[in-house]
Amino acid sequence: MEKADWKQRWGGLFFVAPFLLLFVVFMLWPVISGFWNSFFNTSLAGVKHEFLGLQNWRDLFGDPAVWSSLKNTLVFTAMSTPPLVIVALVMALLANRKGLLGWLLRFSYFAPFVLPATVVTLIWVWIYQPGFGLVNGLLTAGGFAEIDWLNTDNRAMLAVVITTVWWTVGFNFLLYLAALQGIPEQVYEAARIDGANGLQQLFRITLPLLSRTTGLIAVLQLVASLKIFDQIYLMTNGGPNYATRPIIQYIYESGFTSYRIGYASAISYLFFAIIVIVAVAQFKLFSGRGESA
Amino acid sequence: MTALLESTSVSPTTRPARSGPVKPRWTFAGTATTVGAVILAIVWLVPLLWALDTSLKPEPETTRAPITWFPQSPTIGAYRSVIDQGDLIRWFLNSTIVSILVTALTLVVSVLAAYGFSRTTFPGRRVLFGIIIAGILVPPQVLIVPLFQEMTRLGLVDTYFGIVLPQVVAPVMVFVLKKFFDGISRDYEDAARVDGASRWRIVWSVMVPMSRPILVAVGIFTFIGAWNNFLWPFIVTTDPSMMTIPVGLANVQGSYGLRYAQIMASAVLGGLPLLIVYALFQRNVVRGVGDAGIKG
C-alpha cells in the first residue's frame, strides 16, 4: 500500500529522469560552471588558478575587440534578418501549390538548408573566386569590373549575408508554408464571392493572417542571426582585418587559441544576456500584438 | 487494366463538381507567378549545379577564364582522388553513427520526458518544466568552453559519446512533443489502461503511434542538425579519425591546395546523402512542421 502510494506520487519522475540527467550534466552544470569560471583565471583542463573577482568583466568592457565583434554580429543580424523573412514569405506564396511543380519548387527552395556549413562555404568561396568564380565570371561577361568579394572590407560581410540567405531561408520558408496551408479555403471562397481579386486576397486576407507567423519567424531569425559563427569562420576566418569577426569567434579565440578561459566565459555571458534581452523583448512585443489581433 | 479504368473515372472531366476550390482559369498574373517561381528555383539550384559541374571538370579547366558552363571532357577523376587520398569514408561513417545516435537518443528521452510532463504528476513538475524550457534560450555556443572542460575530465574528448551526448539535450523537442501530447485525447489511454496496459506500454503503443508524423519531422530535423553540426564536433575532436564530415572537410580544404575539382567533389559527396534523405521525406517534413503547431 505504501509502495503504491510512493509510485503514485513520484512515478512520473521516471519518465523525465533520462532527459533530466542529460540536461543537468550537459546544460545546467556547464551554464553554472561557465559563470563560475568567469571570476577565475582558469586553464582549459578546468584547473582554477586564481580568483580574479570582477577582473575579467572589467577587462571585457575595456576591450575594443569585444565591441567590434559585437558590432559585426549586430551588423550581420541587421543585414540578414529582413531578407530571410521577406524572401521566405515570397517563396512560400510561390510554392504553395499542388502537383509536381509544387514539389520541385519546395525541393529547390529548401534543399540548401540540409547541407552542412562546410559544404555551403566550400561552394560559395569557389563561387566568389576572383578570375574564375561564377559571380565574377558573370560580372565580367556582363561588362562589369570584378570584385574580390571575400578580401574587401565592405564586401565580405555582404558576401556572407548572401550565402547565409541562400543556405538558411528554407527553414523560414517551411514555417510560412505550414502557416499558409493552415488557412482554410473557405475564407478565400467567401472573398471571391465578394468579388475580391488575387491582390486584394493577398493583402486583405493572407498577409494579415500570417502576421503572427511573421512575428514568430522574426524572433527566431533574430536569435539565430545573433549566433552567427560557422559560415564566417569558414569563409573569411573573421577577416579581412577582423571586419567580419563575430562575437562567438572572439569567444572561441579567447578560450581555445589564447587559453583565457575565464575571460572567454565572461564574454559568453555578455552574449547570453544580449540573446535573452532580444528574445524576451521580441516575445513581449509579438505576444502583445497577437492578443490584440 | 482496372487501374486504368479507375484513373479515368477520377479524371477531372468526369468527376462530379465538388464544393472545393475552383480550378483557376488561365490568367496573366498566374503565369507570371509561375515563371517567377521557376526562375527563383533555378537561382537557388545554380550554386549546387555549379559545384557538381566543377567537380566533373579536369583540374586545369576549373581555373580557366572565361568560365565554361559544361565540362569539355567530363571526368570522375576528382571523386576518385578524393576518396583514395583522404579519410572521407571514415568521416562519412562517423557522421552516420553520430547522427543516428543523436536522433535515436533525442527521440527516446524527449518522448519520455514529454509524456512525463504531459500526463503524470509529481512534486515540482511545473517548476522543473519551466527550468527546462528556459534552456531553449541558452545558446549552445555559450556552453562550448565549460563543456569542453567537462569532457576533458570525463575522458570523452575524441569519443562518440563526447560528440553525441550534449546534442541530445534539446529542450525545444520536449516542448514541441509535450504540446502535441497535450492535444491527444485521454480516452485512448484510458481504453488502453482498461485493457491492462502499463504507463510505459501506453507511451510506446498509444502515444508514439498517434504522433508518428511529428516524430518523423522532429527526427529528420534532429538528423539534419546532427549531421551538419560544426562547432561542437570541431571543438571536441582532435583526432582526424574521429571527425565528422563537416569538421573533416573544413580541415582538408587546405590540403587540397587549389584543386577546385577535388574540393567540389568532396563538397558534393558531403552534401548528397542529406539531399537524398530530404527528397525522400519532403512530404513528412512539411506536414510535420504544420502538426508541430509552430505555425502559431
Image (spheres, coloured by chain):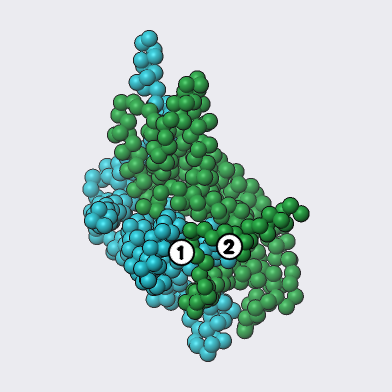
Amino acid at circle 1: Ala
Left or right, A75 with respect to A182, comes to left
Residue at the image position 60 percent from the left and 43 percent from the top: B97
- Chain letter for the cyan part: A
Mark number displayed over residue A99: 2
Task: State the quadrant of the C terminus of chain A.
Answer: bottom left
| Residue B206 or residue B235, whichever sits in front | B206
- Inter-mark Cα distance, 2 to 1: 15 Å
Nearer mark to the viewer, of 2 and 1: 2
Q: Position of residue A220 (x, y in %)?
A: 37, 56
- Chain letter for the green part: B
At mark 1, the secondary structure is: helix
Q: Which residue was labeled with disc 1?
A: A92
| Residue A91 or residue A23, whichever sits in front | A91
Residue A195 in view: yes
Which chain is mark 2 on?
A
Disc on the earlier residue, 2 or 1: 1
At mark 2, the secondary structure is: helix
